[in-house]
Image (spheres, rainbow, N blue to C red):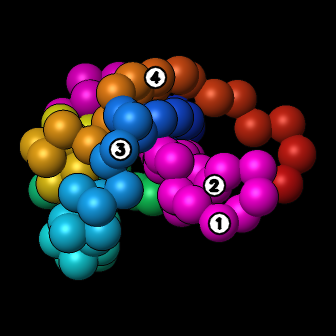
Amino acid sequence: MSTLFAIHALDRDGALPTRLAHYDAHKAFLADTSAFNVRIVMSGPLMSDDGEQMIGSLFLVEAAGRAAVESFNRADPFHAAGIWRAVTITRFLRRQG
């Protein structure tokens, strides 16, 4: 049985140029997550309040367990590039939607 997990990742200060430089690699990585036994339910950038700047990432993923989600997150090019200053992975129980 698969479980849902939320990954909430906040960028470090000044990370936008690095984020943009690794954006294509990040998108390519997300295109096939089967090697990690993770399915992305939805994902996208977190935005500043004015909607002008990407400040992090949010994923809702389905996986057999937390270890798979952690492995998936560590392999993301954004993680490898040191873009995120804080990543929280939390089990999620869907009530609606």
Instruction: Judge whether 7 appears above or below 54 on screen.
Output: above
Residue closest to the eye, 57 or 95: 57
**Amino acid at dot 1:** Glu
The residue labelled by disc 2 is 47
Q: Is residue 94 left or right of residue 77?
A: right
Point out the image quarter for the C terminus.
Answer: bottom right
91 displayed left or right of 2: right
Q: Nearer the viewer, mark 4 or mark 2?
A: 2
Query: Is residue 63 left or right of 57 when viewed as pictured?
Result: left
The residue that mark 1 highlights is 52
Determine whether, in the image, residue 90 is placed left or right of residue 69.
right
Q: Nearer the viewer, mark 3 or mark 2?
A: 3
The reply to whether dot 3 and dot 4 touch (C-beta < 8 Å) is: no
Task: Name the element at disc 3.
Answer: loop
- CA gap between label 3 and label 4 equals 20 Å
Of the numbered discs in the image, which one, if any, rests on residue 11?
none
Residue situated in front as seen by the camera: 33 or 22: 22
The residue to which callout 3 is attached is 14
Instruction: Identify the magenta region.
Output: 44-72
Does residue 38 appear anywhere in the picture?
yes
- Residue 46 locus on image (x, y percent): 59, 51
**Do labels 3 and 2 touch, CB within 8 Å?**
no
The quadrant in which residue 50 appears is: bottom right
First of labels 4, 1 by sequence position:
1
Could you say which disc has been placed on residue 88 in the image? 4
